[in-house]
Image: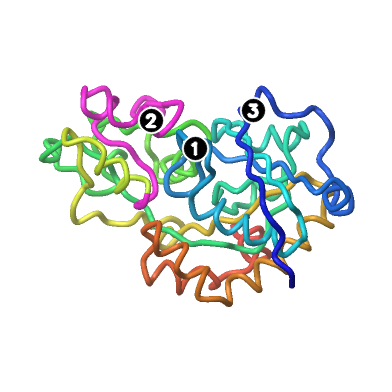
Amino acid sequence: MTRLPFTFAAAFVGLATAAGAASLDQIRETGTIRIAVANEIPYGYVDFNGKAAGAGPDVAKLIAEKLGVEKVEWVTTSFSSLIPGLQADRFDMVAAEMAILPDRCNQVLFSEPNTSYGEGLLVAKGNPKDVHSYQAFAENPDLKVAIMSGADQLEMMQKLGVKESNMVMIGSNADAISTVSTGRADAYAATGLTVSTLAEQNDAVELAAEFTDPVIDGAEVRSWGGFAFAQGNESLRDAVNEALAEVKATPEWTEIVTGYGFTDADVQNASAHSNADLCAAQ
């Protein structure tokens, strides 16, 4: 296939067009697709130079090429606004490696998984509260855990029996370091990749060592992230699935995800479950 020249433009969510989510035919006709990210490193973000990066955007760029789309307009928004944004037709696709969960499958369409990842905890330097698991917040009423609004970890904590009074909600990953380093929360719960990235940014915090992955309903927690689309836009979702399968079969896909810190286990697990499996999971 001929590789088309690309133009990538970053846009803030407030500047996104108000038009409805475009079908595959409309996207090909205009040559432009609007893709949202939540500014989460390493999943999907727009850097200070206006360049989209992360496991989601880098793979999405390859998919767009295969679909014959010449331009991607990148839209940045908060994680909790990704699904509402799709429902309000502010963008056509989300490339944030959002975990494919049954509740979300009732609200938007998901592609087949692009990545897989585990959990982690960001704690103050030296881990003064000696926290090594999510379960600790259910067992010790004096501990508080920070969680990003709209993130999967909220449901995990609820299933583990963590009380609402032990949870501190924050707006974004950018708030995690100050929340933990100032003692507002004893730890920040997020994926292992997110926590590792945050720990590298400030010496006042670190990745909790000897972390024990949560076990919920008898199974160790692992997430599978995919691209998301508005309900009713099966034509775009199906085309992306076809292109994604081709991309994941190449060494370039492996280089992209491992380049952002995904482990060999993450790579091997990325195709362990289908969209149907994950959407039907209890």
Q: CA distance from mark 2 to mark 3?
A: 18 Å
Residue lying at 29% horizontally and 38% vertically, measured from the top left? 137
Look at label 1 and name its amino acid: Asn
- For the C terminus, the image quarter is bottom right
Residue lying at 63% horizontally and 66% vertically, measured from the top left? 277
Inspect the magenta stretch and tell me whether residue 190 lies in it: yes
Magenta range: 164-193
**Mark 2 in CB contact with mark 3 (< 8 angstroms):** no
- Residue at mark 3: 13
Image position of 250 with respect to 65: above or below: below
User: Sequence order check: which comes first, mark 1 or mark 2?
Assistant: 1
Look at label 2 and name its amino acid: Ala
- Crowdedness of circle 2 by 10 Å Cα count: few (<14), some, many (20+)? few
Image spot of residue 96 (x, y percent): 56, 46
User: Sequence order check: which comes first, mark 1 or mark 3?
Assistant: 3
- Residue at mark 2: 174
